[in-house]
Amino acid sequence: MKSAARLYAVQALFQMEASDASIDEVREQFESHRFGATLDGDTYAEGNITVFRSLLNGALENQSQIDQMTDRALVAKWPIDRIDPTLRALFRAAGAEFLAKSTPPKVVINEFVDVAKAFFPDGKEASFVNAVLDHLAREARPEAFS
């Protein structure tokens, strides 16, 4: 359920950016119409609502800090506003989880690399995400790597 919540958080953050919808609108839509819903014959996974809300709130409350950490992890020619919006949402959700300090960094990295694979099954994005998240984790949680 936590894995599904992470995936939904990335989707919700993407949707908020793409549509300028508020956190309340998007949260309600996901919790009412995605978590465990059946649409067009497909059943969506149940997600952990507490984790979902925590990631959304943390990403929004700490967006500036997370974006700055992400910028430092990216090559100078690729600031966060130039990368794919799905990846931007993923980095923000993962950054929120690193800053919450409730899950070991290696678990967060593995979980969000899996999310990247779900969005980009044939691409090299998973390796890119792994490298950026490793940098974010080391900056946000240096004590976990000493």
Image (tube, rainbow, N blue to C red):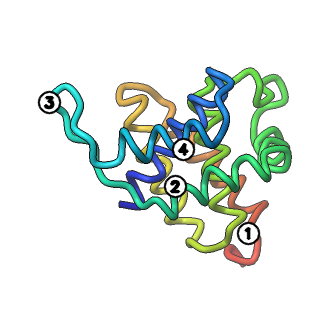
Q: Quadrant of residue 68?
A: top right
Relative height, residue 26 to residue 100 (above, below):
above
Q: Amino acid at mark 4?
A: Arg
Q: Give neighbour class at mark 1: few <14, some 14-19, many 20+ (Cα, 10 Å).
A: some
Name the residue nearer the viewer: 102 or 74.
102
Give the CA distance from mark 4 to mark 3.
Answer: 23 Å
Horizontal and vertical percent position of residue 100: 68, 67
Q: Which residue is mark 1?
A: 141
SS category of the residue bearing label 1? loop
Q: Secondary structure at mark 3?
A: loop
Question: Marks 1 and 3, how far apart in space?
Answer: 42 Å
Q: Residues within 10 Å of mark 4 (few under 14, many from 20)?
A: many
Q: Are marks 1 and 3 in contact (CB under 8 Å)?
A: no
- Name the kind of residue labelled 3 in the image: Gly
> What is the spatial separation of the Cα atoms under label 2 and label 1, in whole angstroms?
21 Å
Give the mark toward the camera: 1 or 4: 4
* Residue 97 at least partly seen: yes
First-in-chain label (1 vs 3) = 3
Give the mark toward the camera: 2 or 1: 2
| Figure quadrant of the N terminus | bottom left
Q: Earlier in the sequence, mark 3 or mark 2?
A: 3
Write down the residue under mark 2. 52
